[in-house]
Amino acid sequence: METIKYALITGAGSFIGGASRYLVSIAVQFASKSGYPISTFIVNIAGSFLIGLILSAWEQDIVSDTGRIFLATGIMGGFTTFSSFSQEIMLMLRAGQTGPALLYIGSSVIFGLLACILGYFVGK
């Protein structure tokens, strides 16, 4: 029964995160005329920062296990876009944009990790 409870909590959070990701992507696309997938980059970096905050709060017992599952697994899991990230890289590579694809991979991983670490320490 606990598994079903957590699955429903994750699903509710994923809905919120996915809808939020869509709205952020639309806003960023409107503001940016770049061909670079900046909206996915922004979502992933912001999501990494927020996951760091959530994990920090969870370690300090500010957020419960259920809250962490709802916030990190649900909302942030729905909000961040690793599958979109992978698709965009594949499309860039197919278009012969190897340099920009490698830059996108490296900057997303490095800045995502740094944002998560920053969020964790800001939460402390």
Image (cartoon, grey):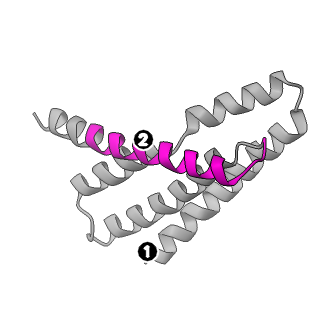
Position above or below: 77 against 50:
above
- The residue shown at (24%, 35%) is 7
Mark 1: which amino acid?
Gly
Estimate how packed mark 1 is, as few (under 14), some (14 to 19) or many (20 or more) residues with alpha carbons within 10 Å: some
User: Disc 2 marks which amino acid?
Assistant: Gly
Look at the image and tell me in which quarter the N terminus lies. Answer: top left
Q: Is residue 25 in the magenta section?
A: yes
Q: Pointer 2: residues within 10 angstroms few (<14), some, or many (20+)?
A: some
Which callout, 1 or 2, points at the residue further toward the start of the chain? 2
Q: Is residue 28 left or right of residue 56?
A: right
Total number of numbered discs in the rendering? 2
User: What residue lies at 71% left-to-right and 52% top-to-bottom?
Assistant: 32
Q: Which residue lies furthest to the left in this view?
A: 1
Viewer-proximal residue, 81 or 111?
81
Say whether residue 46 is left or right of residue 94: left
What is the x, y in percent for residue 39?
A: 63, 48
Q: Which element carries disc 2, helix, strand or loop?
A: helix
Residue highlighted by disc 1: 123
Residues shaded magenta? 11-35
Q: Where is residue 58 in the image (x, y as percent from the top left)?
A: 32, 64
Residue 18: assigned label = 2
Front residue (pair 60, 116)? 116
| Residue located farthest toward the front when viewing the structure as drawn | 30
Image x and y of residue 46, in percent = 55, 58
Q: Does the magenta-highlighted stretch encompass residue 17? A: yes
Left or right of residue 60: residue 120: right
Would you say the magenta stretch is mainly helix, strand or loop? Answer: helix
- Residue at x 35%, y 69% (from the top left corner): 57
Q: Distance between the residues labelled 1 and 2?
A: 24 Å
The structure residue drawn at horizontal position 45% and vertical position 58%, both measured from the top left corner, is 51
